[in-house]
Image (tube, rainbow, N blue to C red):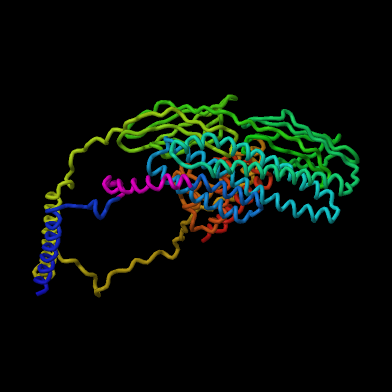
Amino acid sequence: MRRYILWTLALALSAGIIFLVLLQSASPLLYSAEYDAFTKRHADPAVLKPMGKDSAERLLPLMSDLLDTPGTVIINLEYGDVDIARQDLEEFRQLSQSLDSLVINLDMSESEVGDFRRMNQKNLLILSELVESTARLEELNTLEIRFRDARDPASLTSITYEGESLRNQVSQLYTEYRSQEEPLVSVSEKLEIDTTGYEESQNHFEQIVEKIGDEQERRVFTLQTQVQPEISPFELTMSLAPEQGAFHETIQMRGNLIGGEVADREIEILVDTRKAASVFTDENGHWEYLFLVDAIDPGSHTSFAVFSGSTFSDIVSFDVILAETSLTLDEPRVYEGALSCSGGLFSDRGPVDGVRVDLMVDGRRSTSQLTDEQGAFKVNIRPGPGEHKVWALFSNPDVPLSESQSRVYSVTIPPPRLQEPGFFDSWENVLALVLGALVLAGTIIGAYAYLRRSRSHVPAFLRRPRPAGGDFPVIVADPGMPIQERGPDVPEPPGDDVFIAYSKAADSNIREAVHILFSYVRAEIAGKLSLKNPRSCTPREICRKSSNLPLFTDLSAFVRQYESVRYGVKIPDEKERQSFIDLARAIHGSLLGGRGE
């Protein structure tokens, strides 16, 4: 009876599978445009067309709102409503993001709409800095009253210097905003967009500059006439050479501390009221510092020196030159469905190193690459079969380098070579394979059931012998045999050689120094996780593989700092340099603590 049940189940299973295959063989439709318009490999143009039309109808009203909103932000700042101005600025930012999405979706990056978008992004940056500068100036007005009543000349001097820097910064922002007017109005008029509100905002911006200038002159007058200066035995001087610089050039800042004991005294250097460095005087009171022009806006900037928080040098201004750049891209080479692209970034002062260049494909950023010491870059991409427009683009508002674009190339990626259909590409072959497997399975099940039922007919020489007593022998290990424990090797903790190497390299090349520490941390974690080829892992891959380890928090902070220095333009100060060592030691300690787990 049991044999018949097994045969019945096998036949029922075979019939069910054959029925499902026959259902799909008549109409093998995987998806339809009506219900599944988008898949990972497919987008139906008939469905995309009405979406593009709706997006185009939203474009011009959105651009009109973007021309009116800056005026609202500036007027609120003129009347001192900083909080409301911040709300308007946030609305402006959201509108700008909507425009960015529309321009990309409509593939209009190389049109007049694309030019409008780029100028609008510049206006957003200008207004963001204007709001923060205006808010800080209001705080200075409050602090001025407090320090004046307290007869605190040192604090009044400090806020007066900061006010001078902010006045200079707002004046520079107004110059940039004014330079945007003519091209932005020209593009808007071609698109028949009203520019009245935007043109009026120029006048309101000018009123803000004049108001800030009047407040600063009054602040200087108050410091000079209404507060008795402290009598200090020291005098601090400062001078610059040269008084201007371009990207990656240095400006020598130097001076003297005069009066009293002047040897080995700490002098703080401030640029735009932010601390740039601390230096110490020599035995004659002389000090100097080389300021690297790096992540700083083009235009005029202020600098001064402070000793002991109360002795100030005069304010000395310097100019950062906006260097014009030229970006080259060699003709892309096509091989095996991929593109090899290489080029270089140069300014009128030579190659530009350590900045990121974007490779654009059909108006979208495909990848980015840092330039090397010769300004060169090289990337490989796979844009997919078909014809593509490829060019390189450099745009970084955080450094004093102009935006530039390479020549545009048209490249064609051939479709992959057709392969001959395999065995499993035919549903008839698959059906035959399934039926054969079912028949084989049924045969095996039937044979097994038959043998179990007919066991008594099996010859004695084919039966499995059993030991006497019906029990199988138990193998017992020799008690004298030593037991060898197998576990991860526990190496001796390394010395401080890697930290010494980091400290030495940090003085000349901080990017190479942090890479020394990262290589050490990566090797430690690779040993813990038994990773193969750890040198091929990126910092974020190492971080992701360590998400379940106790060291994950320290490793995440280490990776964030590493990427900001290795791949960005950030130059860490002494505290941040020490933070790299502290995090690396913490990770090493966590690994030692976790080996016995």
Q: Is residue 518 visible?
A: no
> Which quadrant holds residue 13?
bottom left
Residue 555 higher or lower than 351, as above or below? below
Q: Is residue 375 visible?
A: yes
Residue 406 lies within the magenta run: no
Residue 473 higher or lower than 211, as above or below? below
Residue at position x 59%, y 53% from top?
86
Image: magenta residue range: 39-64
- Along the viewing direction, whichever of 26 and 298 lies nearer the viewer: 298
- Along the viewing direction, whichever of 16 and 251 lies nearer the viewer: 251
Q: How far from the left and from the top, in percent, is residue 1?
A: 9, 75
Left or right of 287 in this view: 400: left
- Secondary structure, magenta segment, majority class: helix
- Along the viewing direction, whichever of 496 and 191 lies nearer the viewer: 191
Left or right of 563 in this view: 227: right
Residue 53 lies within the magenta run: yes
> Which quadrant holds residue 435?
bottom left
Residue at position x 36%, y 37% from top?
382
Q: How far from the left and from the top, in percent, is residue 436?
A: 12, 55
Q: How far from the left and from the top, in percent, is residue 141?
A: 74, 52
